[in-house]
Amino acid sequence: MQTNSYSEITPEILKLSKLCEETATIRPELYSEYDVKRGLRDLNGKGVLVGLTQISDVCATKMENGQPVPTDGDLYYRGYNVKDIVKGINDKNHFGFEESAYLLLFGKLPSKQQLEEFTSLLSEYRTLPTSFVRDIIMKAPSNDMMNTLARSVLTLYSYDEKADDISIPNVLRQCLQLISLFPLLSVYGYQAYKHYHDGASLFIHQPKPEYSTSENILHILRPDSKFSALEAKLLDIALILHMEHGGGNNSTFTTHLVSSSATDTYSVIAASLGSLKGPKHGGANIKVVKMFEDMKEELTDWTDEEEVSRYLRALLNKEAFDHAGLIYGMGHAVYSLSDPRAVIFHSFVERLSKEKGKDKEFALYTLVERLAPKVIAEERKIYKGVSPNVDFYSGFAYSMLNLPLELYTPIFAIARIAGWSAHRLEELSYNGKIMRPAYKYVDNHKKYVPVEER
């Protein structure tokens, strides 16, 4: 069978796909009948316990009279509240991503000397192999930067003489190199795409050793390499808030799952990137930005609460934007009263909106933040409260930083590689068994029939 194009869906494929659809449907009631936790979640949305970790903790309830009661959310890295971490580094000359990465990897806050040595080590590793940009990143650039990032990670395997060594010292070395290189792989991949697909000028700036991770991202991304202190600070805060989240999210579970097979670091991180790429995981803030762009076009008065509420109801009733029935950026699988990352982000985003002259846009976001929970409660039956999640403000923040949409999810990955690395090291250190979940077979056993008799 020949096709006119590598990507063409032929009539033969369409015919076969119908067979897939006919045979791939599991009746929903079977999940209840066999007590299967679909999506590894109970009926009330609580995640099924599948492992132990010392890296981070997500708290959204407190116990009262033996019963869990919703409370404002908290996120802890190695026992330290992220609110306190951000507060502690909230100084214009102090960036926190490197400090937080050290904390996640080694379980304690670094001393000044330890932080300087760690930052210096990351800077030394922030160099790609000779000709890697020309031979790998510049060739066949993808229109999806997560694809480019995953391909680059898998290719780095070929440059590593100890790629399959899963001893802790070697894996730590690999993880530190990936933490350092993710900004280059992501931004250079974007520059190649814009040059070859859109005809834009090609900029490949070398990272500066004295710059923090957030400063280097802005430096290598922008043609003039210029940025304000507040811009770098906000991006640093974004990296801190996205670098880890309790171990139970899809991509971190993927890190544990694939690590348990004793495969190499590059394969593990590429798998985690594939998970994060999914729009149900890492791409949510893009949806938020596009939803607000549509909202701003549809509304005649951004300050009219009644008009904004009508638009939100139209979203829920599949009458606006993408007709999916969702208000993007609202609600979280764990948090109910508040997502601490959104709470932290709020003040920094407000400051940047003033610097950028985006006060009206920020006011609209704040209004939706206040109105959406009320509208959702009126239109939906919900078992817990609804509040903005971190994606609600992160997309707006990235748009004010003039980050292209193509880099929104890679920025998430640049942050989360620190958490993935900590979880990979934890899995290799404390668990010697391969993960092997069970699936219940729900079809009939059948007798084989020779092809001539079918």
Image (spheres, grey):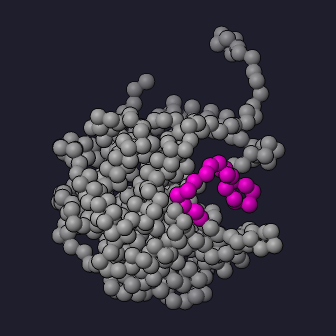
The x and y percentages for residue 310 are 61, 80
In this view, the residue in front, 185 or 426, is 426
Number of labelled discs? 0
Magenta part, dominant SS: loop
In this view, the residue in front, 385 or 125, is 125
Q: Is residue 335 left or right of residue 112?
A: right
Give residue 307's quadrant in the image.
bottom right
Task: Indicate whether 371 appears above or below 383.
Answer: below
> In this picture, which residue range is highlighted in magenta?
39-58
Say which quadrant the C terminus sits in.
Answer: top right
The x and y percentages for residue 370 are 59, 83
Say which quadrant the N terminus sits in.
Answer: top left
Tell me if residue 362 can be seen: yes
Task: Indicate whether 295 appears above or below 191.
Answer: below
Q: Is residue 436 left or right of residue 390?
A: right
Residue shown at the point (45%, 62%) measured from the top left:
108
In this view, the residue in front, 12 or 276, is 276
Residue shown at the point (69%, 49%) measured from the top left:
38
In this view, the residue in front, 357 or 92, is 92
Give residue 5's quadrant in the image.
top left
Task: Indicate whether 6 appears above or below 454.
Answer: below
The x and y percentages for residue 413 are 41, 56
Residue 112: within the magenta?
no
Tell me if residue 412 can be seen: no
Residue shown at the point (55%, 52%) measured from the top left:
250
Residue shown at the point (50%, 71%) measured from the top left:
82
The x and y percentages for residue 172 are 38, 47
Residue 55: within the magenta?
yes
